[in-house]
Image: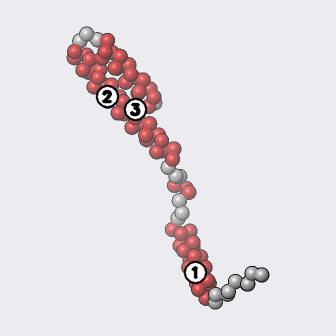
């Protein structure tokens, strides 16, 4: 759809340059500007939509709490174990 708007903007520019009427040229140039802006914004929205993550992939609060508890348990386990020096290398 965005490409179609950009092609219509190109057509409006062609009309603006080929017409002999100044009001028609002004209207065609304004129309061309508006179509280019809408077309580019459409392309950008399409690109952002392709790169956005699905809401289904987001972590729910229950899963987030479970992951935090696991991380805290891991930290507590590493803090509770005494540091064992590495074996000497021969």
Dot label at residue 33: 2
Quadrant location of the C terminus? Answer: bottom right
Q: Secondary structure at mark 1?
A: helix
Residue drawn 26% across and 17% down? 25
User: Along the line of sight, which residue is nearer the eye, 10 or 61?
Assistant: 10
Q: Position of residue 46 (x, y in %)?
A: 47, 40
Vertical side of 66 occupied by 20: above or below: above
Earlier sequence position, callout 3 versus callout 1? 3
- Residue 35, picture quadrant: top left
Mark 2 and mark 3: span between their CA atoms? 10 Å
Give the SS element for disc 3: helix
Q: Residue furthest left?
A: 23
Q: In the image, is residue 74 above or below residue 22?
A: below
* Image point (33%, 25%), residue name: 32
Give the quarter of the image for residue 81. bottom right
Q: Earlier in the sequence, mark 2 or mark 1?
A: 2
In the rendered structure, which disc, 2 or 3, sits on the residue that comes first in sequence?
2
Image quarter of residue 89:
bottom right
Q: Residue at x 64, y 89 (%)?
A: 82
Q: Position of residue 6 (x, y in %)?
A: 41, 27
Q: Is residue 7 visible?
A: yes
Residue 34: % across, % down: 32, 30
Residue 5 left/right relative to 85: left
Q: Dot 2, how many residues are within 10 Å of its Cα: few (below 14), some (14-19), or many (20+)?
A: some
Residue that mark 1 sits on: 75
Q: Residues within 10 Å of mark 3 (few under 14, many from 20)?
A: many
Q: Is residue 23 left or right of residue 5?
A: left
- Callout 2 touching callout 3 (CB < 8 Å): no
Residue under label 3? 39
């Amino acid at each position: 759809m965005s490409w179609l708007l950009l092609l219509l903007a190109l057509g409006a520019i062609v009309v603006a340059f080929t017409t002999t009427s100044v009001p028609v040229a002004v209207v065609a140039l304004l129309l061309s500007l508006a179509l280019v802006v809408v077309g580019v914004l459409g392309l950008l929205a399409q690109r952002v939509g392709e790169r956005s993550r699905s809401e289904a992939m987001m972590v729910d609060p229950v899963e987030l709490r479970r992951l935090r508890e696991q991380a805290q348990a891991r930290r507590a386990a590493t803090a509770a174990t005494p540091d064992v020096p590495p074996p000497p290398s021969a």
